[in-house]
Image (spheres, rainbow, N blue to C red):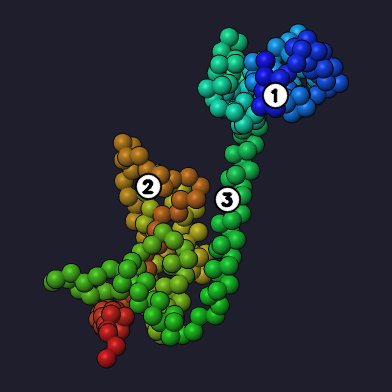
Amino acid sequence: MTHAGGNYGDFEALRERAIGLRRAGLSLRQIRDELQVHNKDTLQRLVEGEPPPEWTKRPRAKDDLREKARELRQRGWTYDQIQAELGCSKSSVSLWVRDLPSPRRRPADTTAARRGVQRAVKNRAAEREELKTEAYAQIGPVTPRELFLIGVGLYWSEGSKAKPGSNRRVIFVNSDPTMIKAFVAWLDLLGVEPERRRFSVNIHESADVSAAEAYWADQVGINVDDLLKTSLKRHNPKTNRTNTGEGYHGCLRVAVLKSADLHRRIEGWWCGIVGGATRRPD
């Protein structure tokens, strides 16, 4: 047998040298370079029967992953969880653990889930309140002109409009006490005398009428006896009403006597606001 450098000489002598190098901890590549034997088959024959040194053995990464995957599966982990934990493909996970029984679904911890929902609701409520507080601070004091414009828009949005052939009269009806207070403040700004204002409650007959009358009288700063007769709406049991319960107070109707001219002015003011808002600069 020969190689590029000449005759190998006695094969058994060469094998003896190769075995000695192998037992000394050399790899096949190191033995090849040392003996100048570049034929792979010959090199294998020279060290035949001699185990490779430990340092040359590749780590059994796949075997380790497989064992870990099986351990996790037996602990009840899902394929997705095992894949994410070990960083391997789901197909590999399936191959390794498919002989193991599927994990039982754990019953949901309703107490923990309920607490989680409560925390989420509480956090959202806190965020909403924070936004409202920030927005409130951005407004600051309202000037008379700002209140005047607000009142015009408020009335044109929620107040009664004149129908063809009907008498013009300023009437404002709303269930929101803050809207009522803003409207009354606007009437004060316009100089509408208190004696020209008439208040009455509109409410379903199934509600607590007395409590509603007391509520609205307190909101506008008058006595219950100063309210006009309450207008009751018949209750239809087939109607699925949501405006019920302790917080339901019906609506308050605010009417202004001798207000035809004021109604015309409101209409003109609103047209002026619209014109000013939509007028294009020259």
Q: Is residue 204 left or right of residue 110?
A: left
Distance CA(mark 1)–CA(mark 2): 119 Å
Residue that extends furthest to the left in the rendered view of this protein: 165
- Estimate the x, y position of residue 215 in percent, counting from the top left: 50, 59
Distance CA(mark 1)–CA(mark 3): 86 Å
At 59% from the left edge and 18% from the top edge, which residue is drawn? Answer: 105
For the image shown, how many numbered marks are present on the structure?
Answer: 3
Q: Is residue 223 left or right of residue 10?
A: left
At 46% from the left edge and 77% from the top edge, which residue is drawn? Answer: 185
At 55% from the left edge and 18% from the top edge, which residue is drawn? Answer: 94
Answer few, some or many: residues within 10 Å of disc 3's Cα (few below 14, many 20 plus, some between 14 and 19). Answer: few
Query: From what the image shows, is residue 99 above or below residue 265?
Result: above
Query: From what the image shows, is residue 74 above or below residue 130?
Result: above
Answer few, some or many: residues within 10 Å of disc 2's Cα (few below 14, many 20 plus, some between 14 and 19). Answer: some
Q: Amino acid at mark 1?
A: Gly
Q: Amino acid at mark 2?
A: Glu
Residue that extends furthest to the bottom in the rendered view of this protein: 282
**SS at mark 2 in the image:** loop
**SS at mark 3 in the image:** helix
Tag nearer the camera, 1 or 3:
1
Residue topped by disc 3: 124
- Estimate the x, y position of residue 14 in percent, counting from the top left: 78, 15
- Estimate the x, y position of residue 135 in percent, counting from the top left: 54, 68
Q: Earlier in the sequence, mark 1 or mark 2?
A: 1
Taking depth in this image into account, of 116 and 179 the one nearest to the observer is 116
Q: Residue 205 has which mark?
A: 2
Q: Amino acid at mark 3?
A: Arg
**Figure quadrant of the C terminus:** bottom left
Tag nearer the camera, 1 or 2:
1
Taking depth in this image into account, of 56 and 146 the one nearest to the observer is 56
- Estimate the x, y position of residue 168 in percent, counting from the top left: 23, 75
Q: Residue 6 has which mark?
A: 1
